Image: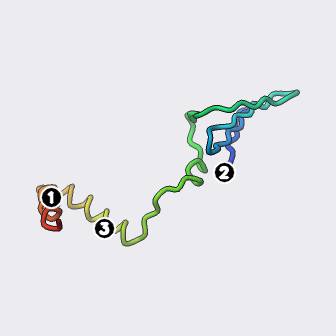
């Protein structure tokens, strides 16, 4: 399954399950190369849309917000350790 292509400066990158398909657009012809990986140094807004990343619901976001709030409090780390030990 190929992810959406990223295009810029005469180059198109298409992420596939086996690697990356690079197409160099230079008049009068195009050349296509395949590679196992590619590094993009510029932010690409749709880069992670095709990846199966975890999506947190509102309840999970609230839980993690509370955990990170407790960690920032003085002694909060120790309190979290104690709560985690008690929950086992």
Q: Residue lying farthest bottom?
A: 59
Q: Tell me which numbered mark, 3 or 2, is placed earlier along the sequence.
A: 2
Foreground tag (3 vs 2): 2
Residue 63: horizontal and vertical position, in percent? 31, 67
Label 3 environment density (alpha carbons within 10 Å; few <14, some 14–19, many ≥20): few
Q: Marks 1 and 2, how far apart in space?
A: 43 Å
Per the image, the residue denoted by label 1 is 81
Per the image, the residue denoted by label 3 is 63
Q: Tell me which numbered mark, 3 or 1, is placed earlier along the sequence.
A: 3
Numbered disc 1: secondary structure: helix
Query: Is 76 in front, or is 30?
Result: 30
Q: Marks 3 and 2, how far apart in space?
A: 34 Å
Q: Residue at x 68, y 32 (%)?
A: 34
Q: Tell me which numbered mark, 1 or 2, is placed earlier along the sequence.
A: 2
Numbered disc 3: secondary structure: helix
Residue 55: horizontal and vertical position, in percent? 46, 62
């Amino acid at each position: 399954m190929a992810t959406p292509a990223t295009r810029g400066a005469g180059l198109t990158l298409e992420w596939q399950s086996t690697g990356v398909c690079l197409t160099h657009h230079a008049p009068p012809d195009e050349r296509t190369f395949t590679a196992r990986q590619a590094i993009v140094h510029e932010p690409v807004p749709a880069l992670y849309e095709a990846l199966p990343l975890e999506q947190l619901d509102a309840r999970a976001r609230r839980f993690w917000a509370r955990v990170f709030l407790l960690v920032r409090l003085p002694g909060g780390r120790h309190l979290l350790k104690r709560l985690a030990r008690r929950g086992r």
